[in-house]
Every structure is written in structure tokens, then in C-alpha cells.
Amino acid sequence: MLTFSCQAILFDLDGVLVDSTPCVTRIWRAWAREHGLDAEYVVHAAHGRPTIATVREVAPHLDAQWETDRIEQREINDSDGLRVLPGAKELLAALPPERYTIVTSGTRPLATRRLQVDGLPVPATMITADDVRNGKPDPEPYLAGARALGCEPKRCLVFEDAPSGIRAAKSAGMVAIGVLTGAGAEGLSQADAITPSLEAVAVTIVPEGLIVALAQ
């Protein structure tokens, strides 16, 4: 069993707490076909990144903001197949609200919708694409999450499923735990440790903060 000491935990949303893969894949593929783009490449490029960054990369000739608004409205309206990932609800319930937050590449309305559909709490300190200038893999989102919780970055632990999120967390000076729901072990090679799911995670609350244990 691996153990880590921290003051707070920062969670990515999609692929860590909720599985939005069916609806995200469906929407991005449809959008790619509309614009004559390689659907599989677009879906891969979109993983763990802000929507607008993906649009700018794969379709620089389009109005990125307008297309982003269209895509995210579709994602808000389409929750078919959305589900809570194993262990997520139980782990969040075990944590004091001031000891964790969510840091997501989605917008606030989209993140809020996904949490509400799955019956998960919406942290008051949640950091979304609306709160930062630079999205993952830039460290800005995770640094903002640490500030929102009043914690030093080096005392924060991150759960991520995307390589871009792992890079963001490490660049922010945080411990990064890869969750095997997205990229697979090879894609998470920069993580400090890897867990198959949040079901394998146990947290003990101590005076100094949290002890996080990963079953191996």
C-alpha cells in the first residue's frame, strides 16, 4: 500500500469522478463529421483539454469561441451514458468540504450539470475553464485550485486521468496520481503513482491534513 500526506486533494472531473466518455465521444465525432475532420483524431485531441483549445488546434479556420459554445451546449444537453465512476461518491463523502475541490477543463455550467446529474456535490471552490486564462497542461488551473483551498501547491495531491492533467499538476509542484480510466498506464508515465480507480483509495483525516492510501 502506498501512502501520501497532504493538506488537500484536487480532483479532475471527467474520467476521475464521472465517466462522460459516451456523450463526449458522440458529440465530438458528430462535430468533426460536420466539418470534414478526422473524428478519431479530434476525439483524441480533446481528451483532458479545454474545448476551445481543441477547436483552435484541429480547426484553426473556424470561429473557435462560436464553435466552443455550440459544442458545450450540446454536452450540457446530452447526459446519455453519464455515470459516477466507482468509489467517487464514497471518497468525496469521506472528505471535509474544505479539504478538496474539483479542477476541470470544462466550463462551469457543464461541470455543474455533470455533477448534478450524477448526484455529486458542487464545491464552492471549483475551478473551471471560466476561471483561468490558460488550461491544462498549463499549471494555472491547479495553482488556482490550491489558492481556492488556501493550501500551498506542494501540500496538494491531484487525481487525474489525462496526460495533460498530469503535466499540469506536476508543473504546479503537486503530487499527481494517475487514474486508469482514460489514457492507460503509458500515458500516465509522469504520475507519482497510478490507481485503477478511486475504489482503491482510502483517506484518513489527521490534525495536519490527510493521509491518502492507495491499495496495490
Image (tube, grey):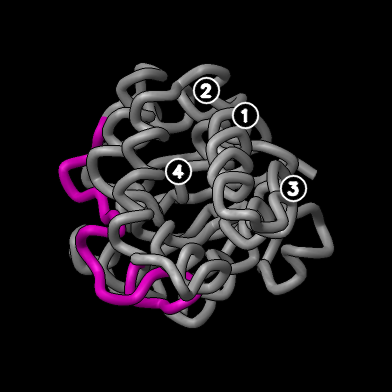
Residue flagged by tag 3: what amino acid is it?
Met
> Mark 3 and mark 2: span between their CA atoms?
31 Å
Can you tell which quarter of the image residue 67 is in? bottom left
17 or 176: nearer the viewer: 17
**Which numbered marker is on residue 82?**
2
Residue in view at x 30 percent, y 22 percent: 116
- Residue 57 to residue 28: above or below: below
115 or 2: nearer the viewer: 115
Q: Are marks 4 and 1 in contact (CB under 8 Å)?
A: no
Q: Residue furthest right?
A: 186
> Mark 3 and mark 1: span between their CA atoms?
33 Å
Q: Are marks 4 and 2 in contact (CB under 8 Å)?
A: no
Helix, strand or loop at disc 2?
loop
Provide the residue span drawn in magenta.
122-141
Residue in view at x 65 percent, y 57 percent: 37
Helix, strand or loop at disc 4?
loop
Q: Is residue 186 left or right of residue 202?
A: right
Q: Is residue 60 left or right of residue 96?
A: right
**Which numbered marker is on residue 13?**
4
- Residue 117 to residue 57: above or below: above
> Mark 4 and mark 1: span between their CA atoms?
15 Å
- Residue 95 to residue 178: above or below: above
Q: Is residue 24 left or right of residue 107?
A: right
Residue in view at x 53 percent, y 53 percent: 159
Q: How packed is label 1: few (under 14 Cα within 10 Å), some, or many (20 or more)?
A: some
The residue that disc 3 covers is: 1
Residue flagged by tag 4: what amino acid is it?
Leu
Helix, strand or loop at disc 3?
loop
> Mark 3 and mark 4: span between their CA atoms?
25 Å
Residue flagged by tag 2: what amino acid is it?
Leu
User: Which mark is in front, 4 or 1?
Assistant: 1
